[in-house]
Amino acid sequence: MTDRTTLIAVALTALLVGSAVGAGVAGLFGDDGTAEADLESKNDPLTGATDPELATFASDDAFVEYFRDASSGIRSGGPTTLAPAGEDGVALEGGTGGEPDVTTDTADAGGETASERGDRTEQRHSETNVQEAGLDEPDVLKTDGESAYYATYRYTKRWAETSIVDVSDPDAPRTVGSIPISGDLLLANDTLVVLGDQQAAGYDVSDPEDPERLWRNDLEATVETARLSDGDLYLVLVDRPGSDPCPIVPYGDTAIECTDVVRPATPADADAVYTAARVDPETGSLESEESVVGSRSLSATYVSENGIYLSYTRSTDRYELQRSFLGSENGSDLLDATARDRLAALETLDISRRAKAVELQETLSDWYGRMDDDEREAARQAFRDGLRDYVATHHRDLRTTGIVRIDIEGELSAAASGEVPGTPLNQFSMDEHDGHLRIATTIPRTHGLDSENDVYVLDSDLETVGSVTGLGVDERIYSVRFEGDEGYVVTYREIDPFYTLDLSDPTNPTVDGELKLPGFSTYLHPLEDDLVLGVGQEDRAPKATLFDVSDPDNPVELDSEILTGEYYSAVSRTHTAFLQDEAHGVFFMPGGEQSYVFDYTGGELEEVARVDLGGAGTRAMYVGDYLYVFGENRAVVVDETNWEVVDRLEL
């Protein structure tokens, strides 16, 4: 084998490993991270900022260079693998961004409401199924008990309308008007906020038959998510920097200087800027904002009553992995003195990371060139074995999730940052409780190394204080739910382990119980104190599973229902498609052909209604004792006292 062929083999081996999954670069450089810190101080044109782990950009050029380096291929956040072609690698089989976001009803969604419009007291009505009580989330259906607002389903064209339906007489609804744009909706008293395609607008709907536009702003960024809390509208906007990115203008004419964007103090898989913004829903004016470097791939956004948590990935690139391995005791012993000296000198060079990667390959090539054939083959094998062992030792360092908390009290500001191994699934992977953040992550599969799943507990400074590791070996997380001091995690590959966690002691979280059953759950919803519902699939059909968690050490499957003949439920994509009505002890889940209502009382799942909309159902709501089931262009009204259809409405 020629020297060039040897070099290519070595480079390919390193590329497969180094591009894999990965972050935690400082961890790969040693316990104190000295080598990485030195590298940053010599070669990073960025200077620093608000927190020891957060920084800002020294100039627009530094901002541009940061994103150029991140997208150059040296550092990529995309799913890659150590595995040979055809073997399941680190791509998270849907990951975040393709996986369903999941949520639960607000605490009072099934009870009487006490709000008023003018001098009219509202009827009992549902609210959007949300993750955190008191934090309303955007959806295509909103109601205040008098009117319903339904945006033509989000996959239709951008110029579709939002229908307004009078539901003051809930058994005899009527369409009374429309708004000429469509999108995700939030209802702030008499103001309907529409988050559409490249635009956001607010409408006065105090007279639903004659809505009046109050404001409209163009969006140069994508709305990642939004929340409505105590009359304030919070937006999380995502902008992908282009060839001339500075300043960033994500919302209306508000310009954000690139030097004001917060970034991690060490390199990350940066491909986007996330802007958290507080907006007055009545005027559309931006009141406060904070922008943070982020990554779209394998990240999640979570909002609590105290802060907005933005996550990003940090992946170990080829150069980092090779250099850190060769700088370790085992790796350094492989090299001769000439190669070690050249490697040390490489750290002092003020050149790009890509140039250093090329130089490292030349160093390896020259090292092999000083050997005879037998020595070269032995060195090559020792390099491969050593690198593989090094990867196994640092499995949890190869891809990590960085987290930035933006406090929302007063001016929005990046207040803390932290980092944990692995990547989250979606917003439900994170939860804030009693001053701690809990986050569930998947440590991806790499060649010869099984995937694992962890849960970490972080304090208010986002320092890890407790963890449970090694759940579902050779599987990945499909759903997570945190509820007070308890946690529930579902992992899956061939079977569905349902784990119950005790999180009452943040410094010592433990696994209480485990239940294995066929299929998997992509959404977990606490129905009552001791009942948790899982919505997912089995044999490619939607499935609902009822769990009894009264004894956390021994969770029990009480009942399950498979929607035979169906192929899809919108709950698998978004939690807002799910509805629970506690007053009647039922829940709604749409199917691909029909929509279903199940009674969950008595420890069994009983189908009490099946609604035919002539196609897939999208959403449901209740007003009084009437359930409204919406499809693409129509709604069906069902009397919840006898489950008979009482009206059909064309939209």
Image (cartoon, grey):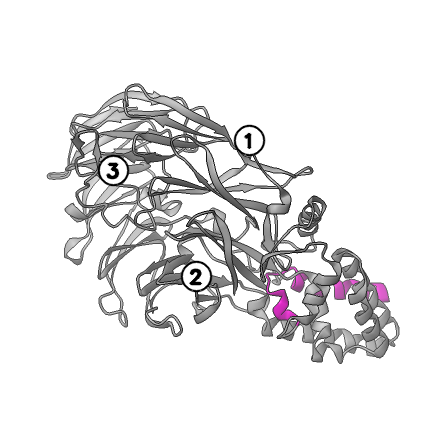
Which residue corresponds to mark 2? 439
The quadrant where residue 637 appears: top left
- As measured in the structure, the alpha-carbon distance from the residue carrying label 3 to the one carrying label 2 is 31 Å
The quadrant where residue 499 appears: bottom left
Residue 233's spot in the image, x, y percent?
40, 39
Residue at (16, 36) in percent of width and height = 624
Which residue corresponds to mark 3? 621
Instruction: Please state the extent of the stretch shown in magenta in the rendering.
Output: 1-29
Q: Residue furthest top?
A: 210
Residue 409's disc is none
Q: Main secondary structure of the magenta part?
A: helix
Residue at (40, 73) in percent of width and height = 507
> In this rendering, would 526 be left or right of 507?
left
> In this rendering, would 232 be left or right of 16?
left
Q: What is the quadrant of the N terminus in the image?
A: bottom right
- As measured in the structure, the alpha-carbon distance from the residue carrying label 1 to the one carrying label 2 is 36 Å
Q: Is residue 497 visible?
A: yes
